[in-house]
Amino acid sequence: MTALTLAIVVAFVLGYTCIATESLTKVNKAAVALLMFVVCWTLYMFDPLQYLNLMHPDYTGGIAGMAEKVTTIIQEHLGDTSTTLFFLMGAMTIVEIVDQNGGFNWVRGVMKTHSKRALLWRIAFMTFILSAILDNLTTSIVMIMILRKLVADKQDRLIYASLVIIAANSGGAFSPIGDVTTIMLWNKGLITAAGVIMEIIVPSLISMIIPAFILQYYLKGELKMPEENCNCNADLGDLTEIQRRAVFCIGVGGLMFVPVFKSITHLPPFVGILLVLGVLWTTTELFYSHLTHGHEECECGTMKRVSNLLSRIDMSTILFFLGILMAVACLSEVGVLSAMGEGLNVIFDGNHYLVTGIIGVLSSIVDNVPLVAGCMGMYPVAATGDMAVDGIFWQLLAYCAGVGGSMLIVGSAAGVVVMGLEKITFGWYMKKITWIAFVGYLAGIISYYFIRTFVF
């Protein structure tokens, strides 16, 4: 590792440390992430030619074409990052529209119970199932909105929100469309839909059930419902029950349609999200078209139009995502991630359970997308054995990269968005939840070993 590469790694580690200690430094994590992104790439530009020769051996532009090539590389990474950001913004806006227009009211009735532990299990299984159908990011947003309708106590809601992260990541790991990493492996032909569902669903379920079983002992007593402060009623132009359900069906049903839209059109998922947002936006505008200006808003905001609801989107979370993903992209461009993967393979002598297990732990520290991308480019597909299609390595990689992100709150898209919505600190999650998520993660790997050894 050269001195410049070491400086980039140190800048990333220092930035990550500041993010992890946000509760102590009182500096917003988004600001640190943006600085980390800029510093890493600025250091990269001190000697970009060494990295271009290392990671882009086909580059022949020499010193003259360096700046243009680096600009192209950054724009490519920014393009990949932007698809995630637009997907996130679209999904957050859709859920906000559904929530503010009362679309989740009837769901709250279905989930309603007086027992804290009963609610925990309902939340766990609903999140697990939805994240396999939608994706872990969108599901997390939906479930947090529902929790806000059901749980008044902030400390209790932190426990439920933590379980949402674990259940969303576990549910996304066994579905070919439930997580970005499984989508990558599926599109590349390294796993099949039937294979990953049949063989990973049990480990994924175990990785959710065990943490839920432990977390239930953190909850005691009866639930206290949040107070409704809105004085709106039907006479003031509030949406009818049919209109509310229509908003829910278009919003949530549209989110479920996004994977179908992608498979039909082969367009990126964020395009489908924007389609759903456009349809939902148009629908609510038509619903409100009969209202006078004085009736378009109420004190709690349930009757605001979409143009007003856009201001409620948490831009600090979006900017944090931008900074962290672009900083990780720099690590990828200097060869750190691929070298890390090769080193793991050598150290553990090709033991795929240990290699993928460590990759899963690393995915809670850095983004799992470049880690999986590095593994895909580093390990060749074999005709038979562990490295074959649906082999142990690729299926374990899908499980570990997905579920491993639950061990730190910044280890997954679900964790990052819940962190922003519920203001969970990195330190609180590490102290209370990390060991619980790790126990479930490890139990899932062990169960997979028995399934592959004695069942398949």
Image: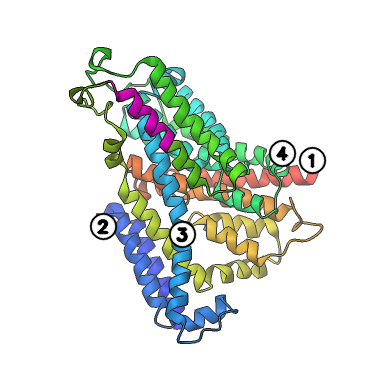
- In the rendered structure, are the residues bearing label 2 and label 1 in contact, judged by CB atoms less than 8 Å apart? no
Magenta span main SS: helix
Residue 79 is tagged as: 3
Q: Amino acid at mark 4?
A: Met
Q: CA distance from mark 4 to mark 1?
A: 11 Å
Of 248 and 132, the residue lying toward us: 248
Question: From this viewpoint, is residue 210 visible?
Answer: no
The residues colored magenta run: 278-290
Mark closest to the chain's N terminus, 2 or 3: 2
Q: Is residue 167 left or right of residue 113?
A: right
> In this figure, which residue is indicated by the disc labeled 1?
455
Q: Looking at the image, which residue is at 66% across and 38% down?
A: 201
> In this figure, which residue is indicated by the disc labeled 4?
198
Q: CA distance from mark 3 to mark 4?
A: 34 Å
Q: Position of residue 153 (x, y in %)?
A: 31, 29
Crowd band around label 1 with a 10 angstrom C-alpha radius: few (<14), some (14–19), many (20+)? few
Instruction: From the image, state whether disc 2 or disc 3 is nearer to you.
Output: 3
Q: Looking at the image, which residue is at 35% across and 45% down?
A: 420
Q: Amino acid at mark 3?
A: Gly
Mark closest to the chain's N terminus, 2 or 1: 2
Q: Amino acid at mark 2?
A: Thr
Of 146 and 153, the residue lying toward us: 146
Mark closest to the chain's N terminus, 4 or 1: 4
Q: Position of residue 358 (x, y in %)?
A: 59, 58
Instruction: From the image, state whether disc 4 or disc 1 is nearer to you.
Output: 4
Q: Is residue 169 above or below residue 47?
A: above
Secondary structure under tag 2 reads: helix
Residue 25 is tagged as: 2
